[in-house]
Amino acid sequence: MDFRIFDHIPIGVCILKRDRKVLSCLYANAALKRMIGLMLEGQELEEIWPSPETTELAKKLKSPTPPFEATLPFKRNGRACWALLTISQEQYEGRDCYALWATDISASKEAEASLQRAVSSADAASDQKSNFLATISHEIRTPMQSVYGLLEMIELEKPSPNILSMAQTARNSASGLLEILDDVLDFAKMDADQMELDHFEVPVRTLARGILEALSVKVQGKNIALKDDIGGDVPFVIVGDPKRLRQIIINLMGNAMKFTQSGSVTIKVSKGGKVLAVPSRGFVLRFEIVDTGIGMTEEVAGRLFRPFSQADNSTSRKYGGTGLGLSICKKLVELMGGEIGVTSEVGKGSVFWFEFPTEEVSTDANVLDLPKLDGISVLSVEDHPMGAKEIVKSLKSMGAHVESCPTIEEALRLVQRRPFDVGVIDQGLPDGLGLDLIREIMQIRPFMGLVMYTVRDDAGLQHSLQSLGVNYLAKPASRVGLGEAVRDAAANSVKLDSTGPRKLIIAEDTASVRDVLSRQLNNIGVEATFVPNGREALYAVRSGEYGILLSDLHMPEMDGYALVKAIREDDEKLGRHFPVIALTADVQMAQRQVYMSHGFDECLLKPVSLGQFRRLLIRWGLLTGGDATAAETAVVENVPSSSAIDRDAMIQQMGAFDENAIEMLKLFIDMTRPLVDQLKITSSAKDHNAIKEVAHSLKGAARSACLNKLGDIAAQIQNDAESGMLDQDLISKAEAEFIRADKEISSL
């Protein structure tokens, strides 16, 4: 073939001498020269297209099986370009050659790169949005949990009716905000494709009727009836995600109740969908939430399932909400392989519906293997006869020993009489709330695992349980879900070893705090050994002489965290569990999931009242039960409110404000004066780390001596030092408050 006929075509052509050693150019047409911009004849392939890709192509062309196509980069006017080569074997001037047909694909490559950049940018923006939502939700949730917890503590203090009403209103608002934050987190997860569904057993009728029971408290005082309408052919148990199904139905029910002033809201369940085709295995299940509310236009209904979208602006003002609930429902239903929608007419109510493919489960079959609960003893507190029977039957089928009772009174008698590994407790009981029962059980059996199993869907309740370290399980749970909750609670429970030594050792580095604790123990007739740091405490525990340890957290040589870690490592080797109680002024540490996550069994907050000390020692077997001494109920009258000493706290702590308490306060002044002097020295040197340590010691000493004003000032100095700040006015205030306390104590 005479290749010179290709001099005028737009496709580049190159004829290469086919040789096992050299691939040199015999001919190049004008189009290729314009593309590459070189005199090409006589040059080797790797000189024409210098690149790693060309080196690889040259190797293949010298092999017995040459390729038919390749893509090579080249430079044109300093810009990176690409050529697509089609390779054929030809004859040129009587020689065996390769013909390379080159097409410039630079524009396509640039478009592809641009598209990839756009996709990457969109993915990054989506990830950034999801991460932002999750981060903001988390950062708001953290302080909100503290707000909720403090409001709950105010209620537990039994304040006046006016303060109680304000605290309850604020707590309800905090609960509402926590629910919104949960919605934001769910939305962020689904937006980032991080939401995964479970596949468990779902008892359909229990699900529907449990939701109606949970929502019944929200219609009290309203003229709304909550109903269910479940078709007779609907299976009793299906395969699905009970938590997410419950979330969808509660969202749709809540929406219906919000826009219904009178009439009814009904959960209707039927077999067979109107939109989805019946799957090859199983069937389609359809849920409808039918209300007699205000209804809406077709235009409004069309935008309801968009994120942050509501019916209209007036709806936002009158009815509130974030507009996330329906968007989350839509995403969850789509994850289930289903569809969701709404039909409505203004003034005649609405029907929100969703349907999804599922399968029937025989009541004798299991979707998953059941957890093994052999030997675990469980106390079930459930007042509904059928519910109690189902819990007992389910747990016994997994090997657990179950005792069931319907009331708080009976449950407390059982707990006091014998230990259980786990308690499964309903919230709504005939003689009170399950949450209150849980708090009482934790006082009697701090080592018992606990599960709240309830139809109540309350973010505030869930937060309260979380702060106590108690598992929350929503009804209805599958047998697998219930079994796993009991198994996990049993695994996290602490076993009290009452057969070993019961001698008490206390690790505390502040001398004045040791003095207070010693006097308290003398008051209630308990002996203890005191050590000033964690290293000595660990040595004492390893001696085998002691059976329980109270430990401060911040100590020299070895702090409380390192101490309990070392003890837990010893526990693993020895096959035991040594009781360790945290002794701290850190309020956050008092939350059960916090101290247990560090390995502690319980927490005492400084200053420790005499009653708290007595109850703890009774729980752990160092004291027998009995009434408080008369000294514990002593009172002091005509005390100035501006006193440096909190005398009510002193009575709670020492049993009375008597000569023993006054002697302790005078010893406090002598022991603590060096700390105040050291605080002035370290602040002058601006040594933040030293300031933090001294302020921490002063805080613990002052609060243990019931000098709470001084303790609060020291706490602020400690917090500032941890943040790298120093306020000389606070140092001066601490010194002045110490001098005031000294004068007041000297006059006693």
Image (tube, rainbow, N blue to C red):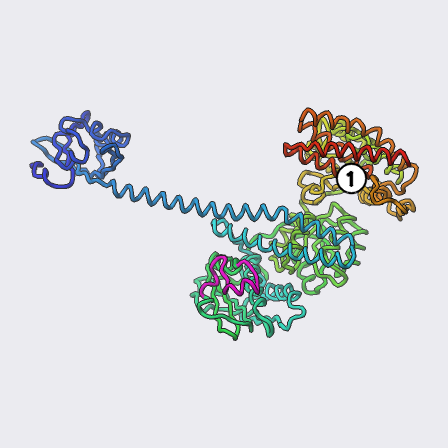
Residue 183 location, quadrant: bottom right
Give 275 or 50, whichever is nearer the viewer.
50
Q: Is residue 369 left or right of residue 567?
A: left
Give the position of the C terminus as an image quadrant. Answer: top right
Query: Residue 480 or 464: which is nearer the viewer?
Result: 464
Q: Is residue 343 visible?
A: yes
Q: Is residue 579 visible?
A: no
Quadrant for the N terminus, please: top left
Residue 477: name its quadrant: bottom right
The dominant secondary structure in magenta is loop
Instruction: Determine which quarter of the picture holds residue 655.
Output: top right
Q: Is residue 611 magenta?
A: no
* Label 1, residues with CA under 10 Å away: few <14, some 14-19, many ≥20: many
Q: Give the residue pinned by disc 1.
A: 709
In percent of width and height, residue 352 lies at 51, 67
Q: Is residue 320 magenta?
A: yes
Residue at (49% x, 73% y) in the render? 345
On the picture, is 567 further left or further right than 194?
right
Three-letter code, disc 1: Lys
Q: Position of residue 416 (x, y in %)?
A: 81, 51
Position of residue 38 measured from the top left corner of the image (x, y, whole percent): 17, 30
Which element carries disc 1, helix, strand or loop?
helix
Q: Which residues are magenta?
A: 302-322
* In the rendered image, the vertical position of residue 428 relative to residue 464, given as above or below: below
- The foreground one among 37 and 598 is 37
Number of marks in picture: 1
Q: Locate residue 526, reporting x and y percent.
A: 87, 37
Q: Is residue 547 above or below residue 416?
A: above
Residue nearer the viewer, 184 or 20: 184
